[in-house]
Image (spheres, grey):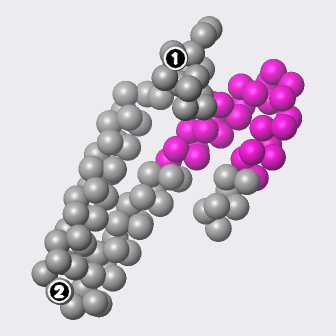
Amino acid sequence: MDEPREAQSCGCRHKHTPRSEALQADVQKRLNRAIGQLNGVKAMIEDNRYCGDVLTQLAAAESAVRRVSEMVLEEHLRTCVVEEVRQGNDEVIEEVVGLMRRFC
């Protein structure tokens, strides 16, 4: 299956197995929350708020983004990686190891 021209030009790839609607909705909700938290941090900086309060909000935003990353990584392992290994592509394991190193 050919990828859309936009995907070819940016180097993006698409999943063969679509994400479930429930996962997409959960990820979108969590990302919107993190975006809201970051916008709040931006406003706090502009308002010259106390550093400790800003750092607390930044930690909350980081935690929200980390949870989304965990969810996407789990989905990647359960779908993309399994599919590649079943097709004989063991090199995908190196990709996963690299991705996991980013989270530790």
Give me the disc on residue 5. Answer: 1
Judge whether residue 38 is colored magenta: no
The image position of residue 60, as x and y in percent, is 34, 70
Secondary structure beneath disc 2? loop
**Distance Cα–Cα, label 1 vs label 2:** 45 Å
Q: Residue at x 41, y 67 (%)?
A: 62
**Kind of residue at disc 1:** Arg
**Kind of residue at disc 2:** Asn
**Mark 1 Cα within 10 Å, few/some/many (few <14, many 20+)?**
few
Give me the disc on residue 67. Answer: none
**Magenta region, residue range:** 71-97
- Nearer-the-camera pick, 8 or 64: 8
- Nearer-the-camera pick, 22 or 97: 97
**Which residue is outermost to the top?**
1
Left or right: where does residue 30 sit relative to residue 71? left
Instruction: Quadrant for the N terminus, please.
Output: top right
Left or right: where does residue 39 sit relative to residue 82? left
Give me the disc on residue 48. Answer: 2
The image position of residue 77, as x and y in percent, is 65, 40
Judge whether residue 81 is colored magenta: yes
State which quadrant residue 85 falls in: top right
State which quadrant residue 52 falls in: bottom left
**Which residue is outermost to the left?**
47
